[in-house]
């Protein structure tokens, strides 16, 4: 919405939420999320044509176009639990819009939703409209931005996708939204489709991206057994333009609020439509990701003489990727959870993640509650200085690819660690040869270091 406000001075954009606390944060000097470049834009346009408010009813009444951008988390109970998306919040929005609208509205699905959610929203809107003659047009306009690069992704999108009904009213609504984006996006990058293609494309885009990571991660396991180097393999295959170089960075596993959730949702849809083979195919992308995380943690324990009990492990990074403070489904959480089960002590350093956010991730993703887990404060510590985190540690594991991790003084770090000092590079970002020269025992994803006589076989 900030990018729309920036590029469309003639449009008034108001972001509404029922949470006064959230809206207050958006109206304050400290925005509730960290996203490079966003601060400047919000502060520049706030109060001009960008507003944040809790007056939901009035803002719906005043609006011509309403973007529904609520969360659609994986269901935690009932039919499809653990896989299907809960679209409760989308339905609540549709009910509210129907209840208070007195003029025609274009309702844009921005949230990632299961295919045919627009159909459900349409029915709810039309069954509950209080004013006669008021019409609703539903559009699907999925969001493809990635966290950490959101401002750039929105400013120069590879494409904008708009789906709508293919009748007269639907096509006019599509055109209205095309006209908004056309203020800064070249027309040829705005793709229009029917509603269902648009809804499905979002799930499929994320499934394909995640599939590439799981594919290269599966190969990393093979590399570790064969002396091939996964970075060299990725580079070699990525130069084929049919494959391309992006999303081939082998890692400890993908995280984030989208990939796993959207694939599980896709799997559930396939099962619902009685396509078990298709469901099993996509499920394997998530299974491989789980395998990669467990494999990494198991390898850590194995290399550290089969026990980490009571050992201090320094964890560099808790965010699910660099340049964000987001921790949802982060691989770092899974690795720490496994270390916790082995009674290791983890000292975590992340430049952008607060202890509170980290504890929330443990609670929601791993069911580890700070309030009831009696040893949590003893076993998981957070440090605001990387050197303090590494001091007295038996091992460092790199979980997030933050640039600053590359430029630390590793001689100084080595001097203050317990020997042998291990580094497990879950992102393949460090200079492994240099670290080994300092004296570290280094393990990385999809690599073997035979020259020091260490084989991972
Ligand atoms: C993703 C999609 O990229 C975006 O289009 C969609 O709108 C939302 O989901 P995001 O989750 O913000 O965006 O981050 P992304 O850059 O895709 O990374 C997801 C995860 O994959 C991260 O944990 C990242 O570290 C990991 N990753 C990415 C790899 O392990 N290797 C890679 O080569 C690329």
Image: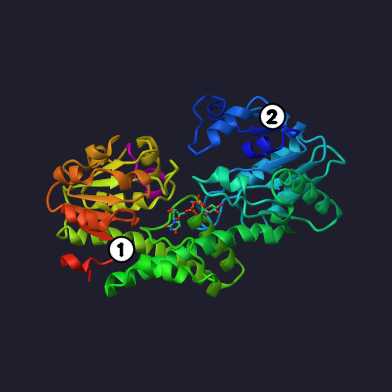
Where residue 445 sits, quadrant-wise, is: bottom left
Q: Nearer the viewer, mark 2 or mark 1?
A: 2
Image point (39%, 58%), residue name: 253
Task: Categorize mark 1 by other alpha carbons within 10 Å: few (<14), some (14-19), many (20+).
Answer: some
SS label for mark 2: loop
First in sequence: mark 2 vs mark 1: 2
Q: Quadrant of residue 19?
A: top right
Q: Is residue 90 left or right of residue 251?
A: right
Secondary structure beneath dot 1 equals helix
Quarter occupied by residue 65: top right
Counting from the top left corner in percent of width and height, residue 387 is at 23, 39
Q: Is residue 187 visible?
A: yes
Whether 375 is drawn above or below 241: the answer is above
Kindly check if marks 2 and 1 are in contact, taking CB atoms under 8 A apart as contact.
Answer: no
* Residue position for label 1: 295
Q: Which residue is mark 2?
A: 49
- Residue at left offset 58%, top offset 67%: 270
């Amino acid at each position: 919405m900030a990018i729309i406000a920036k590029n469309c001075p003639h449009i008034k954009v108001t972001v509404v939420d029922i949470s006064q606390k959230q809206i207050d944060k958006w109206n304050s000097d400290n925005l509730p999320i960290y996203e490079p470049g966003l601060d400047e834009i919000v502060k520049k346009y706030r109060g001009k044509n960008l507003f944040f408010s809790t007056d939901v009813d009035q803002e719906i009444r005043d609006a011509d176009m309403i973007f529904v951008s609520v969360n659609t988390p994986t269901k935690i109970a009932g039919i499809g639990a653990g896989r299907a998306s809960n679209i409760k919040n989308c339905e609540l929005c549709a009910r509210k819009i129907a209840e208070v609208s007195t003029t025609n509205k274009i309702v844009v699905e921005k949230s990632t939703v299961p295919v045919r959610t627009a159909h459900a929203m349409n029915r709810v809107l039309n069954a509950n409209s209080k004013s006669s003659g008021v019409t609703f047009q539903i559009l699907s306009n999925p969001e493809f931005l990635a966290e950490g690069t959101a401002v750039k992704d929105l400013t120069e999108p590879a494409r904008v996708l708009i789906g709508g009904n293919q009748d007269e009213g639907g096509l006019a609504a599509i055109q209205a939204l095309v006209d908004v984006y056309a203020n800064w996006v070249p027309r040829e990058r705005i793709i229009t489709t029917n509603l269902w293609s648009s809804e499905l494309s979002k799930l499929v885009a994320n499934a394909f991206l995640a599939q590439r990571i799981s594919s290269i991660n599966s190969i990393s396991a093979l590399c570790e057994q064969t002396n091939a180097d996964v970075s060299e393999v990725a580079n070699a295959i990525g130069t084929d333009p049919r494959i391309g170089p992006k999303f081939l960075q082998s890692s400890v596993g993908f995280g984030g609020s989208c990939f796993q959730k959207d694939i599980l949702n896709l799997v559930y849809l396939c099962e619902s439509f009685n396509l078990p083979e298709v469901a099993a195919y996509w499920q394997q992308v998530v299974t491989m990701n789980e395998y990669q995380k467990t494999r990494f943690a198991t390898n850590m324990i194995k290399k550290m003489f089969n026990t980490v009990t009571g050992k201090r492990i320094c964890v560099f990074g808790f965010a699910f990727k660099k340049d964000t403070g987001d921790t949802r489904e982060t691989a770092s959480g899974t690795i720490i959870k496994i270390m916790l089960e082995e009674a290791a002590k983890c000292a975590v350093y992340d430049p952008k993640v607060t202890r509170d956010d980290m504890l929330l991730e443990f609670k929601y993703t791993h069911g580890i509650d700070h309030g009831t887990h009696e040893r949590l404060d003893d076993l998981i510590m957070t440090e605001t200085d990387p050197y303090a985190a590494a001091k007295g540690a038996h091992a460092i594991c790199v979980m997030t690819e933050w640039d600053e991790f590359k430029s630390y003084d590793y001689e100084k770090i080595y001097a203050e660690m317990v020997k042998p000092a291990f580094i497990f590079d879950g992102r393949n970002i460090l200079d492994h040869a240099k670290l080994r020269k300092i004296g570290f025992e280094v393990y990385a994803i999809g690599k073997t270091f035979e020259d020091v006589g260490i084989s991972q076989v």
